[in-house]
Every structure is written in structure tokens, then in C-alpha cells.
Image (cartoon, rainbow, N blue to C red):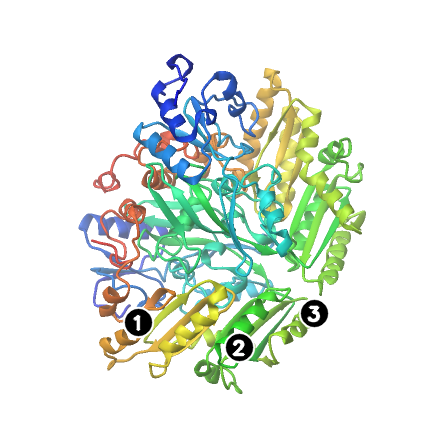
């Protein structure tokens, strides 16, 4: 086999022989190293960042992944695992290191309908799994807005959420077992697909580790039954405050909606001006999209309660989708909201932060105040039931003044969320985008503990280097913990 | 303070806990971490010179009902949390077996203990949002947070949950609460003893269009103690929802079997009925094999005077309880438990001498050992509890 990998085309510290050795594992067409070929893999869902990998390699089977990771370990080369590259925190950016693409591993290996389990490869697209099991009346619950493109492997790495996580939980709650290639090439099984798991919850630690702990090559997920009935409601309000009050009232009522989403005026107008127009009232200050699901019995009583609570909170109108088509249309507006806003400006920065639910009204007011001060337009479309905000700002990244104001406003918004007792990411991950806020959220000791945990999985720190925990927090990593404390 | 003869300290704050751990490090004396003492004989014997009692690191730190979250210090009892949250129509859906007047939330999380409500709400790992703990290197560390959705940083919360105090001493936890259902009902269904009938009940339960709050099969011994008219094995089902939902659920349950009403305190009695001394083991396999797992459990129970079992068909787990006493002979117990089966066995409580023979340890790979070595390199926290080499 000819490798065709002249040293001159390789960047950084990656030696020419590596591309050849990777080619020997996966085949010539599956190793990219020319600048032009790497262009598509030089960004992910986080706008404004461009980082070129040295080599991109695309194994086609679990065994090839193992062989590639072992080769990278032997060569002591760093790598970044990547699913569909839809992540919004820059977690899949590979800066001069090897990009390990997993999107060819798309097999659903088994489905156990009686126990509601499926075993999938990491490259299976989120929605493809739900489609594949729908004939059995089953679905895979976590539904990030990018579910038509994002992969289950990427969802595991990011502990992805989605609108329906309010009722059904995030990715963590749906993963039963993982077959993982550790960065050193060892293969381990975390969790237990058959019986109860004992010992440390390494499965729990792995989910959401953003590619820093290794590569999942077989994922056992829990499926749920397609609910017997679904009701989707749209309530519109003349003030954000009133909408936030309705959220609190619904949550406090004991009804657990499948989803409880809020969109503000800017979002509504962007959606209605786009091909995703969902019929949201364009003069509303906010709309709530509420979905209730479950057994038929008693569902309409819950719908009546939600309608009443929304009206009491000040809703002008409350509409219940009358059929599947109307329901799909109402949801399309929500799921494509970022796409609709992307139409308006050349660039869109989407934030992800969580505040306690009761702090939503004050936080939305604060965001509005910050936006005015920096003369930027913030639109809010978010998982109100979880307190998971997604403020986003459209702008032109080529206008340095505007870009600076946008980033300053976002920084202030994130600080405000932390001050309100919240967190800096509910579902998008830290990646590189949120690194600057980790110090504000966690103490040095906590960050060190996280670094130490990463060191257990990846002592060489070659898997997704420089992500999640700020490097300066990890300076003391290599000093044995006992030595650090010997002076105490 | 405690029944142990070892020196005991009862810190009242996280900082004091940290200082006690640092003292333990500098003096190289290992600590036995104790909450309310509910599960003191659970898991492997700990070789420790001193006891760190967490009972006084207690109290609710933050409870905003509208957030449906609660932050409490580790020594807060489950009963206190239940009292405070019930006043706002909410509850913490953790009901581990044991005395809830003593059981602390910290120990519940540390031991990943759960009860019948796990059928609907999952186990502690699904309910804990954040933890504060003191590592075995004497650092006071936080993982997670106080909000219901959080992916910031590596998940120290899941790591600590169920680590039996061997990686860190939990000082504070934040948990997700649920609103209490408008209506609850508890029903009983007789389940004749055959494998076929047990499988039929499991399968019908699995096909119901709703998931009950709890569905626990109790064997005839336990049923006699719990229900007035308990005859044979009985499926206890806990329903919740609005009036119409519960009415319909009750109707639909008839596909499983003939239904009779029970007092709701049966759940509390089930959890607190545990004998003070017992060997306890959980058998698990895929739910579709539940009937066989139940049979395997029956095979153990039948060979032990006073033994009983109960299990969750939806989770595929059966819990076997064998009462023990001063005169219990280890070899007799070993003869009953040492038989192999097709299930995964997780031992909760055993006489000290039997651990080595039945469940020597849970360290399965390099990662397990290195996690312990990283978070507790000097083995000062509950050494031996996971069967780790020392």
C-alpha cells in the first residue's frame, strides 16, 4: 500500500510516517492530511473558531478505532474524537493534532424490545435510532435540537440534553453500558447492560467527559415507549415576566411536562420571517411551548390545568395543537429557531447557561439590561422548565467593534448566571468556549480533582487536550496528591 | 457516641470534616465514615483506627420550592427532608431500606441506596445534582451544582455517588425533588408462585401504558407481615397522578391480576422491616429474566429460616434478606449463598468473615484502582470497604 503522505503536507509535530501507519489501518481514502481536505474538519458548531487538525482519520469499525487509538498511543500523538461536529462549545476542534472521526460507525448492533435496550455504534445519528425502533413503539428520549445530524457518540461525550429532558432526563440517564477505548488503547466496559453495576460509577464519570477520557465504540442505551398520547400547547404573553410566572406555576403544580420551552419576541419574529414560520403571534413578548405526554387517561385534565395556569399568569391566548401536522409545525419553529436567526446575521453566538427556575424572570431582565448596555440584540429561546437559558446574539464577526461588544455582553451574562447560583453549561459542554468561566464556578481544589480524574483515564493527556478544565488549574497534576498535602 | 471502641469525632461543618481528614493524613490513622449508623454493617469491614461521625454536619442549606431542588448537609436525615418538603407538596424520591429516622441523605448518596421508588424515579445517580466532599488528600471539593441540568466540568458527582465514602467524605448534597402527585393509591395483587405466573405478571406490568411509582413483588413471608390478608407472593403497586389518571391506572392494573386496596404505610413498613442483623444480597439480570431471578432467590430463601425476598420486575432486581443472630454459623450461611446462579450478585450485608469468600472486591480494572489511588492515596477513608488491595 502506498501512503502518499509527503512530510511537507503535514503540519506541526505529526510525522509523515504516522499518516502512513494510519492509512495501513483504515485505507488511503480514510486519512486526510491536505489543507483543502481538512477544511471541513477545521470548525464545529461553535462559530468564529477555525483550528486545523494535522491529520483526520476515519475508521470504519470498532476494531479499526482500537487500532488507530493504539497507533496514536504508540506514536504519542494527541487526538480529538469527533462525531458529527455539531457541538456548540468547540469540543471537536483539533488544533494541529489528529482528528478521529467516528461518523462512519453507524451500525445499530442490536435492539432488545422486551428490555427496551439498544446497542449502537458511536456514529449512529440520534434521530436515526428513534426512527429505527419506532416500529416497535419505542424511542430514544434525549433529543438535542441538532438531532437530525448529531451522533449518539457525540451525545455521550457531551451528556447532551434537549427539550424533552425536562421529563425524561439527559443522556446520562439513558446510557446503560459503554465499551470504551482508553487513550492508551486499552479496551474496557463501563456499566453493566445485564445486571446491577458495582464499584465506582465510571460510566457516570465517562458520560459528559467531552472526549477527554477515551472513545466509546459500543453504546448500550435505554429506550422508552412512545407515549400513548401527546398534547402540544402554545401560550402567548405580552410580557416575559408573565411567561416566566406561568413556567413557575406549571412546574409547581405537580404536572411534569415533557417539554416546557420559551421563546422571546426577537426569536418569534425571526422564526416567523423564515421558512420555519410556525404561526407564533408576532406581537407577543414571549411564547411558551408546552408539551404534555403519557397515557391518554388524565392527560386532558393536565392540559386543562396548564391552560388555566397560563391564563392566570396572563396568557393572551392558549392554543392546543389539533393534529400531528400542527404539532410538528409548532415544534419546527422551536427546533429551527437558531437556523432562522442565522438567516438574519452572518454569525450567531448561542450561549448555554442554567439558573434556578425561580431566578428566570430576574435573569431575563438582567440579560435585557446587559444587551442594551452593549448595544447588541439578544434573542432568548430556551428550556424554561429546566432553567436552561440559550441567549443568542446575531452579529458580524468581521466587524471587530461589534464582535468585541458581543463577546463582552456574553461574558457578563455568564457571570450573572453564575452569581444567580447557576452554571455555565446545561447541555453544550465546556469545550474551549467556556474554559474562561470554569475558575469562577469551581475552586482550585475542585478543578484539580477534575484534572486528577482525567489523569486516571488519560495520564498522557493526549485525548482532546486543552479542553474542559483550564490548563493552569492542572499545573499541579503531576505532583502526587500525597506530596501536595505533606505539609498540612 | 457510637458503639465502636475506636476514637470518634463529630465535626459540625465541612471545614471541620476537612481538618479531621487532614489530621488523619498527618497521623496516618484511617477513618471509618459514619452517617446515622443505619448501614454500619453494610459492605465489607473497614479497618480504621477512628470514626468520623457525620450526623452533626446537618441541616437544610437551601430549599426554594419553586426550583424543585434542595441542598442539605450530609447528616440531615431523610425524615427531616421528607417533613420539610411535604409542607410544600414535594418529596425526595429516595426510600432506601432501613430506618429513615436515622438514615442520612449523605449516607444514602454515598452508598447509592435505593428502595421501591427506583422503579419510577431511578437510583441516587439519577437524583443527585451536586455534591461537596472532602477527598482523601484533604481537599474540599464540589462537583455539579444546584441546578437541575449541568454539564460543567468532569462529573465528580457521579464518581462520588455509590463510592461508599472511599473517595471522599460527602459534606453536602443537592438533590432533585418531585411534586407529590395529587392522588396516590397503593394496591396489591396476589401472584401465584409458578415461574410462568411470575413471568406473566412481569410481562403485563411491562405492557401497561403507564409506569407506576413503585411495583415491588414481595414473597409470602414478607406479605404475611406487611398485609393483613397477605397469603402468597404479592405485587405491591403504588400509583400516582391526577384523579382520572389514577382511576384509569387502577382499571388497567386488572390485566395484571385481581386488585385490592392497601394502606399506603405499607411502603414505610416494607423499608423499615429489615431485621437489625441480616445477610442481604441483590440478584439482578435483565428484566425479561425476572421470573428466573425470582426463582433463584426463592431457592436461597427456602434454605434459611426466616429468610425472605422482594424484587422489582421492571428493574430485574430481587433482594434476598436472611436474618442472622449470635448463633448464626458462617459456614451455614455460606452453604446457602455460595451456590452459583445466573444472576449478578451485589452483596449489601454479610458477616465479616464471608466477604472474602463471596465478594472479595469490586476493583475490576486499572481505572478502579487508580481512581482510589488518586482520591485516597493513603487509604484513610473507609479502607477495605470495596475490597481494594491495601
Q: Residue B339 has which mark?
A: 1
**Residue pictured at 45% horizontal, 38% vertical:** A61
Q: Is residue A260 left or right of residue B20?
A: right
Q: Do tags 3 and 1 sit on the same chain?
A: yes
Image spot of residue B78 (x, y percent) = 46, 65
Q: Which mark lies nearer to you, 3 or 1?
A: 1
Q: Mark 3 = which residue?
A: B243
Camera-nearest residue between A445 and A214:
A214
Q: Residue B197 has which mark?
A: 2
Label 2 crowd bin: few (<14), some (14–19), many (20+), radius 10 Å:
few
Label 3 crowd bin: few (<14), some (14–19), many (20+), radius 10 Å:
some
Camera-nearest residue between A11 and A8:
A8
Camera-nearest residue between A10 and B144:
A10
Label 1 crowd bin: few (<14), some (14–19), many (20+), radius 10 Å:
few
Looking at this rendering, what residue extends furthest in the left direction?
A: B27
Q: Is residue A11 above or below residue A59?
A: above
Amino acid at each position: 500500500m502506498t501512503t502518499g503522505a509527503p512530510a511537507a503536507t503535514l503540519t506541526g509535530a505529526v510525522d509523515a510516517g504516522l499518516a502512513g501507519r494510519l492509512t495501513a489501518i483504515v485505507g488511503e481514502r480514510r486519512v486526510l492530511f491536505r489543507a483543502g481536505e481538512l477544511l471541513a474538519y477545521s470548525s464545529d458548531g461553535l462559530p468564529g473558531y477555525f483550528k486545523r487538525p494535522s491529520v483526520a482519520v476515519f475508521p470504519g469499525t470498532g476494531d479499526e478505532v482500537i487500532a488507530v487509538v493504539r497507533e496514536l498511543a504508540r506514536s504519542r500523538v494527541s487526538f480529538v474524537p469527533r462525531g458529527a461536529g455539531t457541538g456548540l462549545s468547540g469540543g471537536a476542534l483539533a488544533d494541529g493534532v489528529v482528528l478521529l472521526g467516528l461518523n462512519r460507525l453507524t451500525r445499530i448492533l442490536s435492539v432488545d424490545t422486551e428490555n427496551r435496550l439498544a446497542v449502537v455504534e458511536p456514529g449512529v445519528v440520534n434521530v436515526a435510532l428513534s426512527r429505527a425502533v419506532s416500529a416497535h413503539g419505542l424511542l430514544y428520549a434525549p433529543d438535542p435540537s441538532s438531532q437530525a445530524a448529531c451522533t449518539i457518540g457525540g451525545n455521550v461525550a457531551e451528556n447532551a440534553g434537549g427539550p424533552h429532558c425536562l421529563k425524561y432526563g439527559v443522556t446520562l440517564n439513558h446510557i446503560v453500558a459503554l465499551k470504551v477505548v482508553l487513550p492508551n488503547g486499552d479496551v474496557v466496559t463501563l456499566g453493566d447492560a445485564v445486571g446491577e453495576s458495582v464499584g465506582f460509577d465510571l460510566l457516570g464519570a465517562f458520560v459528559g467527559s467531552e472526549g477527554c477520557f477515551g472513545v466509546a465504540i459500543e453504546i448500550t442505551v435505554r429506550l422508552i415507549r412512545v407515549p400513548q398520547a401527546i398534547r402540544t400547547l402554545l401560550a402567548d404573553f405580552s410580557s416575559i415576566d408573565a411567561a416566566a410566572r406561568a413556567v413557575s406555576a406549571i412546574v409547581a403544580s405537580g404536572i411534569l411536562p415533557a417539554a416546557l420551552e420559551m421563546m422571546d419576541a426577537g426569536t418569534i419574529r425571526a422564526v416567523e420571517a423564515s421558512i420555519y414560520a410556525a404561526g407564533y403571534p408576532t406581537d407577543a413578548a414571549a411564547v411558551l411551548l408546552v408539551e404534555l405526554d403519557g397515557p391518554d387517561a388524565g392527560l386532558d385534565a393536565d392540559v386543562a390545568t396548564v391552560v388555566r395556569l397560563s391564563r392566570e399568569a396572563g396568557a393572551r391566548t392558549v392554543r392546543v395543537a389539533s393534529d400531528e401536522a400542527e404539532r410538528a409545525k409548532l415544534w419546527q419553529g422551536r427546533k429551527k429557531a437558531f437556523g432562522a436567526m442565522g438567516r438574519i446575521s452572518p454569525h450567531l453566538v448561542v450561549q448555554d447557561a442554567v439558573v434556578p427556575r425561580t431566578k428566570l424572570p430576574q435573569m431575563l431582565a438582567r440579560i435585557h439590561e446587559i444587551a442594551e448596555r452593549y448595544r447588541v440584540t439578544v434573542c432568548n429561546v430556551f428550556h424554561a422548565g429546566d432553567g436552561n437559558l440559550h441567549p443568542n446574539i446575531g452579529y458580524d464577526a468581521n466587524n471587530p467593534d461589534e464582535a468585541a461588544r458581543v463577546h463582552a455582553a456574553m461574558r457578563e451574562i455568564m457571570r450573572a448566571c453564575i452569581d444567580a447560583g447557576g452554571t455555565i453549561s446545561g447541555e453544550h459542554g465546556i469545550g474551549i468556549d467556556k474554559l474562561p468561566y470554569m475558575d469562577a464556578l469551581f475552586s482550585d481544589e475542585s478543578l484539580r480533582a477534575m484534572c486528577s480524574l482525567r489523569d486516571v483515564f488519560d495520564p498522557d493527556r493526549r485525548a482532546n487536550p486543552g479542553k474542559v478544565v483550564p490548563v493552569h488549574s492542572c499545573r499541579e497534576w503531576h505532583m502526587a496528591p500525597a506530596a501536595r498535602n505533606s505539609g498540612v | 457516641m457510637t458503639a465502636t471502641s475506636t476514637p470518634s469525632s463529630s465535626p459540625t461543618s465541612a471545614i471541620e470534616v476537612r481538618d479531621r481528614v487532614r489530621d488523619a493524613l498527618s497521623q496516618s490513622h484511617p477513618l471509618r465514615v459514619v452517617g446515622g449508623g443505619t448501614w454500619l454493617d453494610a459492605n465489607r469491614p473497614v479497618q480504621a483506627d477512628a470514626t468520623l461521625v457525620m450526623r452533626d454536619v446537618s441541616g437544610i442549606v437551601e430549599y426554594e420550592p419553586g426550583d424543585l431542588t434542595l441542598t442539605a448537609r450530609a447528616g440531615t436525615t431523610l425524615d427531616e427532608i421528607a417533613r420539610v418538603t411535604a409542607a410544600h407538596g414535594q418529596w425526595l424520591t429516595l426510600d432506601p431500606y432501613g430506618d429513615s429516622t436515622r438514615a442520612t441523605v449523605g449516607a444514602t448518596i454515598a452508598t447509592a441506596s435505593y428502595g421501591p421508588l427506583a422503579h419510577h424515579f431511578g437510583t441516587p445517580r439519577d437524583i443527585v445534582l451536586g455534591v461537596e466532599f472532602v477527598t482523601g488528600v484533604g481537599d474540599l471539593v464540589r462537583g455539579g451544582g444546584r441546578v437541575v441540568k449541568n454539564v460543567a466540568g468532569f462529573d465528580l458527582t457521579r464518581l462520588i455517588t455509590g463510592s461508599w465514602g472511599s473517595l471522599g467524605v460527602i459534606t453536602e448534597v443537592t438533590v432533585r425533588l418531585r411534586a407529590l402527585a395529587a392522588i396516590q393509591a397503593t394496591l396489591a395483587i396476589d401472584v401465584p408462585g409458578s415461574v410462568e405466573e411470575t413471568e406473566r405478571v412481569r410481562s403485563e406490568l411491562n405492557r401497561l401504558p403507564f409506569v407506576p411509582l413503585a411495583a415491588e413483588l414481595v414473597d409470602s413471608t414478607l406479605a404475611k407481615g406487611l398485609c393483613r390478608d397477605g397469603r402468597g407472593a404479592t405485587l405491591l403497586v403504588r400509583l400516582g397522578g391526577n384523579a382520572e389518571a389514577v382511576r384509569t391506572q387502577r382499571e388497567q392494573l386488572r390485566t395484571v391480576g385481581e386488585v385490592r386496596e392497601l394502606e399506603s404505610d405499607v411502603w414505610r413498613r416494607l423499608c423499615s422491616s429489615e431485621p437489625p442483623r441480616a445477610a442481604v444480597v441483590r440478584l439482578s439480570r435483565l428484566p425479561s429474566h425476572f421470573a428466573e431471578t425470582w426463582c433463584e432467590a426463592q431457592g436461597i430463601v427456602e434454605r434459611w429460616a426466616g429468610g425472605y425476598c422482594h424484587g422489582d420486575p421492571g428493574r430485574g432486581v430481587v433482594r434476598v434478606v436472611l436474618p442472622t443472630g449470635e448463633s448464626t454459623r458462617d459456614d451455614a450461611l455460606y452453604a446457602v449463598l455460595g451456590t452459583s446462579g445466573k444472576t449478578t450478585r451485589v452483596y449489601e450485608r454479610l458477616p465479616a468473615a464471608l466477604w472474602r469468600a463471596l465478594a472479595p472486591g469490586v476493583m475490576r480494572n486499572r481505572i478502579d484502582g487508580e481512581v482510589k489511588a488518586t482520591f485516597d492515596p493513603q487509604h484513610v477513608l473507609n479502607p477495605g470497604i470495596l475490597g481494594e488491595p491495601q
